[in-house]
Image: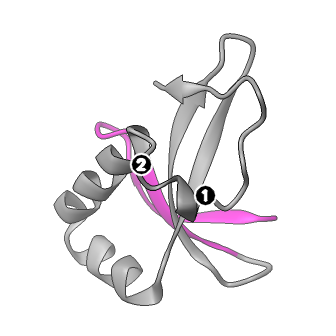
Amino acid sequence: MKFKDTLVLRDERFSIGIELESGRRYVSFPVSNGVVDYEEYYEVDSEEYERFLINPGEAAGFVDECRRHTRDDLLMMKPGKNRGIPI
């Protein structure tokens, strides 16, 4: 998978982008498991993607749900046994 961020919100610590090989859209944020820091990627549909680009505040609410693991059904890559926590 090749992820390309379209919008990076540094203060809010998340990104919105497109996975180049499949064309799927995502939001991502950094996590850490104490050994390594990495990104978790959550798929969004094209309508959500466009809406989040226009209104990043709306995306922030979605990202908060993802950070609480309530949207894990949308993970693009399932985490390993030692899952990280949002940083």
Determine crowd level at label 2: few under 14, some 14-19, many 20+ residues with C-alpha closer than 10 A: many
Q: Amino acid at mark 1?
A: Leu
Q: Main secondary structure of the magenta part?
A: strand
* Secondary structure at numbered mark 1: loop
In the current view of this chain or complex, which residue is farthest to the top?
A: 34
Which residue lies under the disc numbered 1? 75
Q: How many marks?
A: 2
Distance from disc 2 to disc 1, alpha carbons, whole Å, reads 9 Å
Q: Which mark is residue 41?
A: none
Residue at image x 55%, y 61%? Answer: 73
Residue 13 magenta-highlighted: yes
Of the image marks 2 and 1, the number of the one nearer the N terminus: 2
Q: Are marks 2 and 1 in contact (CB under 8 Å)?
A: no
Residue at image x 74%, y 12%? Answer: 35
Q: Is residue 50 above or below residue 27?
A: below
Q: Is residue 8 above or below residue 53?
A: above
Q: Amino acid at mark 2?
A: Cys
Q: Which residues are magenta?
A: 1-19
* Secondary structure at numbered mark 2: helix
Residue at image x 55%, y 64%? Answer: 74
Determine crowd level at label 1: few under 14, some 14-19, many 20+ residues with C-alpha closer than 10 A: some
Where is residue 37? Give x, y as percent. Answer: 66, 25
Which residue lies under the disc numbered 2? 66
Task: Say left or right for 61 vs 65.
Answer: left
Q: Is residue 53 above or below residue 75?
A: below
Please state which of residues 73 and 55 is positioned toward the viewer in this rendering: 73
Q: Which quadrant of the figure contains the N terminus?
A: bottom right
